[in-house]
Amino acid sequence: MKKQNYEIKNAQIRERFETLRKSRPEKLNQRLNLSWSNWGFGIEPLVATARRLADVDIRFIELHGNHYGVDLGYQPAETLRILADHNITVGGICGMFSRENELASNSGIVRQQAVDYLKRTIDFAAAVKAGYVLVVPGAVGRPTAYDNSEFDRAVATLRLVADRFVAAGIKAAIEPIRSAEVSLCNTIADAKAYIDAVAHPGVQHINGDVYHMQSEESHIGMALLDAGQRLANLHLADSNRCALGEGSLDIDTVIRALYLIGFNRPGCYVTPEPLGPGGDPYPAMNGKPNPATLDRMVQQTARYFREREAAVLAGE
């Protein structure tokens, strides 16, 4: 029987991976860096989050970018103390962009709020030694465009803080999000075009998300290969946006593609972010979570990812 198109692409990636595995086995010695994005844990104290991640040997975290004002958000010294107590390092900061602080807004007041938010977030990222800050050009939860100038406004506004990324040694990682949630920058190709338009050394990286990619890309694995060295972080969730192993995502092909682009190097992270289905997951960040539910979600995801990674590396 003739293979389906996605199967042909899967096979191409597998063939390339097997060639790498057999000819350059040293390239696979270092495992992928497993992190976790904690903003979906709502108002849970950071110490509880750190304990949960440490219990399943997750040693990196993507922190909620919760510096919405000068008096709000994690404090650097306390954050570093809590994470050090659990042997956890900050991988990056998940920048949060809503209608109140979006780069593409048609309101100058809102764009200024986006600039101020990014300045606070970059400063915090530098203080806790994060490697990247996730940036979304438009507001998550606003899929309808204001007008045809959104892209240009988002480019111009991000340029205002681009020097700050360089000075802090922080990567700006542009995240494409599915068109059901944002009005612009939906694919890896869109993110690359946005980066090229900003045209600044401080804005050169991409934050992928397999949940959004399954809606917007023709093939997740091929899109990851296209992102290549620009990929700084990859959010993971299964096809139903739940824990890995609870949907139909082909995680093996994702893992193979990541090894092919050398994503198992220091400073690159695979970061689960299972938020559940829906067009606007932002309300979760202000809610009170169920600890037992979070425990099961983290345990299931970490176990399943490591099982599949081991199987892929063994050539199974």
Image (spheres, rainbow, N blue to C red):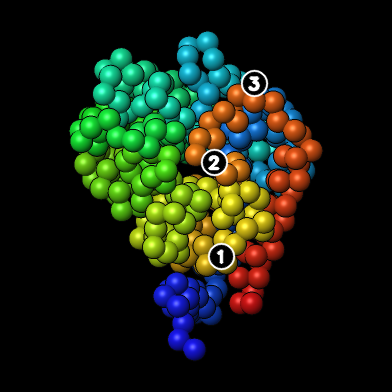
Type of amino acid at the residue the image marks with label 1 = Asp
Type of amino acid at the residue the image marks with label 3 = Glu
Quadrant where the C terminus sits is bottom right
Residue at image location 32% in from the left, 41% down from the top: 184
Q: In the image, is residue 160 above or below residue 207?
A: above
Seen in the image, is 94 located left or right of residue 163? Answer: right
Quick check: can you spot residue 272? no
Instruction: Identify the residue position indicated by label 3 in the image.
Output: 78
Do the residues under discs 2 and 1 have CB atoms within 8 angstroms? no
Q: What crowding class fits label 1: few (fewer than 14 Cα within 10 Å), some (14-19), or many (20 or more)?
A: some
Instruction: Identify the residue position indicated by label 1 in the image.
Output: 250
Q: Quadrant of residue 43?
A: top right
- Indicate the position of residue 146 as horizontal and vertical percent values: 27, 30
Q: Nearer the viewer, mark 2 or mark 3?
A: 2
Residue at image location 66% in from the left, 50% down from the top: 243
Q: CA distance from mark 1 to mark 3?
A: 39 Å
Residue at image location 64% in from the left, 21% down from the top: 78
Q: Secondary structure at mark 1?
A: loop
N-terminal of the pair, mark 2 or mark 1, is 1
Instruction: Identify the residue position indicated by label 2 in the image.
Output: 278
Type of amino acid at the residue the image marks with label 2 = Gly
